[in-house]
Amino acid sequence: MGYYAGVDLGATNVRAIVAEPDGTTIGVSRNATPRGPTGIDVTEGVLETLRDACTDAGVDPTAIEAAGIASIGPFDLAEGAVVDPANLPDSIDRIPLTGPVEKLIDSEEVYLHNDTNAGVIGERFYSDRNPDDMVYITISSGIGAGVCCDGHVLEGWDANAGEVGHYVVDPRGRLTCGCGREGHWEAYCSGNGIPEYARLLAEDDPTTATDLPLEDPDFTAKDVFDLAGEDELADYVIDQLAHWNAIGVTNVVHAFSPIVVSFGGAVALHNEDLVVDPIRERVSEMVMTNVPEIRVTELGDDVVVEGALASALTAGTGDRQHYQG
């Protein structure tokens, strides 16, 4: 009997799961994403995590018939590699993925997807309704979207479709994104961007009272949300995040006309009332077309890695009609 695997390479963690042909998970592993110094070090971290999942499952990696990989981008699809990832150190310019995983499992059935595309694959594969027009948006270390339109997941010719986190939401360009461009949605509202945005707003009005540890190098987005309702600056930051998030989501709705917009990622999942609820309220007033159902994924942190597994189970399509389990 052959087995199947899903791998999720994020800017913070690498996850892997191994499953039986019916989709039952029998092995899992999770490790911190290596910070370099080179992309090969990240590749080795991915391989180690997949090996650990195989060990947990009690199977040899060569027993894996097919694997799906969900990863941060952007991609060089011809090489099956990540190139110049925005949220990893600058020394990491290329992360080979497809070839090394093929070699590890001794199979050419390895399917590479942007992590948010894997998210929308997972949402559709496990959904009771399997909507043909939906968007999965992650707000985590970065921001991105997986788009399914008329039943087709939009990958793009180079697998880089869905980089909505790089929509320009602020034409003044007051913050620089991790990609090096200015004014991007991700620069303001991602987990990595929120601390710098809080510092910027504090500089705008130094008289605003705050207990936020703005000068602490370990200051994080969590600090902002933890002080919600108790700190003047934290509340102002959260209100401004709602403003930029609503602009970004409205642009997504006008571009793709989804029936459902599903949110994932640590920032959204851990702060639904402070992040997703304000989006619901504001988008309904900003959209000129159909207002979609806005919800949080029921798969939680597993949505991307489960989407990668669904890709492996369906020969890369994520479509249930290709599922033989």
Image (cartoon, rainbow, N blue to C red):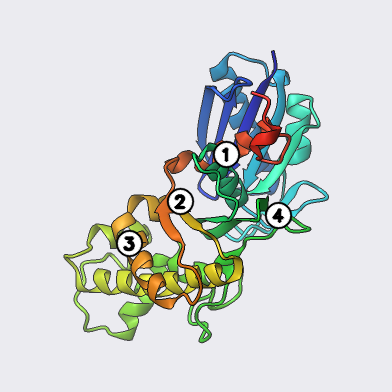
Q: CA distance from mark 3 to mark 2?
A: 13 Å
Quick one: SS at disc 3? helix
Q: Mark 1 or mark 3, which has the lower sequence index?
A: 1
SS for callout 1 = helix
Q: Mark 2 vs mark 4: which is more N-terminal? A: 4
Q: Which label sits on residue 277?
A: 3
Give the residue number, with chain letter if any, for mark 1. 125
Determine the secondary structure under disc 4: loop
Q: Quadrant of residue 86?
A: bottom right
**Badge 2 vs badge 4, beta-carbon distance below 8 Å:** no
Tags 1 and 2 touching, CB below 8 Å: no
Mark 4 — residue? 155
- The amino acid sitting under disc 1 is Phe
Q: Residue furthest left?
A: 230
Q: Residues within 10 Å of mark 4 (few under 14, many from 20)?
A: some
Q: CA distance from mark 4 to mark 1?
A: 16 Å
Q: Earlier in the sequence, mark 3 or mark 2?
A: 2
In percent of width and height, residue 103 lies at 78, 29
What residue did someone put label 2 on?
Answer: 264
Residue 172 is labelled as: none
Residue 124: x, y in percent?
A: 56, 44
At label 3, the amino acid type is Asp
Looking at the image, residue 44 lies above or below residue 94? above
Q: Position of residue 123 (x, y in %)?
A: 53, 44
Tell me the mark number nearer the camera, choosing from 1 and 2: 1
